[in-house]
Amino acid sequence: MANNPPLPPPPWQRVPERAKSRRRDPLTRETIVTTAIRILDAEGLDRFSMRRVAEELDTGAASLYWHVGSKDGLLDLIMDEVVGEQEVPEPDPEGWQEQIKEVARTMRRTILRHRDIVRISIGRIPMGPNAMVLSERVLAILRAGGVPDELAVQSYLLMMSMVNGFTMDEGGYVEEPPIGAPSLEEAGAMVRSYLAALPAKQFPNLREVADHFAITDQDARFEMLLDLFVDGLAARV
């Protein structure tokens, strides 16, 4: 993106426009965002604050506000920086279905790499420069595969919701589950035992499929979700 002209700011942008850093100010917006992401990954959103970032940078909170405007402005920048970690291949009309699956896999890996990033995304419309590049490239894949424009846009948005929802649930086991909470495998075994013990006359279906509730391979479950999503999309096309 370095050789491309800067994009106009979205109408709701909360980050101030600055021509350049203040004289003798060692801080940069990039340094602030990198530090903030490191703190979020280590400590989580509940412990995150402008003061905490300022302490890490050995400066005052006012200096941060000059660069990023507000805490929400900083979270917008963090979101776009994380989005920028995702790589999208050049469109292959013959292989568009597998490419879309790989985009979703990359989204999931990126989300799981950054603690609470899905929580930050709630209520935010991702329209920073990195988000624009990601959207452009994903839509290029869908349109190259013959997906009609309206379906391409809606399926792209649905794919993001699908991945966010899956990883939000999955993240409860990846990050810090409540004290005393069972592991994913333990929870699966407990659910299976409970369902198998239900009254057969009242819950015949749950009893008969109880073993399948103990399957806790999140990768396999995500791949099934991708197959269902992309197969349904391809059927529409």
Image: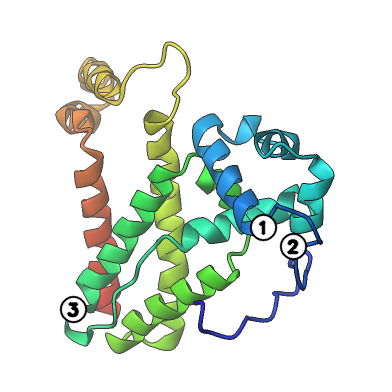
Please report contact status of discs 3 and 1: CB closer than 8 Å, yes or no: no
Please report contact status of discs 2 and 1: CB closer than 8 Å, yes or no: yes
Which badge, 3 or 1, is on the more N-terminal residue?
1
* Closer to the eye: label 2 or 3: 2
Residue 16 quadrant = bottom right
Which residue matches tag 2? 15
Residue at screen point 15% across, 28% down: 211
* Residue 85 visible to the viewer: yes
Residue at screen point 24% across, 23% down: 185
Secondary element type, mark 2:
loop
Q: Nearer the viewer, residue 131 or 224?
A: 131
Q: Amino acid at mark 3?
A: Gly
* Residue 146 visible to the viewer: no
Please report contact status of discs 2 and 3: CB closer than 8 Å, yes or no: no
| CA gap, disc 3 and disc 1 | 39 Å
In the picture, measured across the screen, residue 103 lies left or right of residue 76, that is left
| CA gap, disc 2 and disc 1 | 10 Å
Residue at screen point 18% across, 78% down: 95
In the picture, measured across the screen, residue 213 lies left or right of residue 21, that is left
Secondary element type, mark 3:
helix
Which badge, 2 or 1, is on the more N-terminal residue?
2
**Number of labelled discs?**
3
Q: Nearer the viewer, residue 234 or 58?
A: 58
In the picture, measured across the screen, residue 155 lies left or right of residue 98, that is right
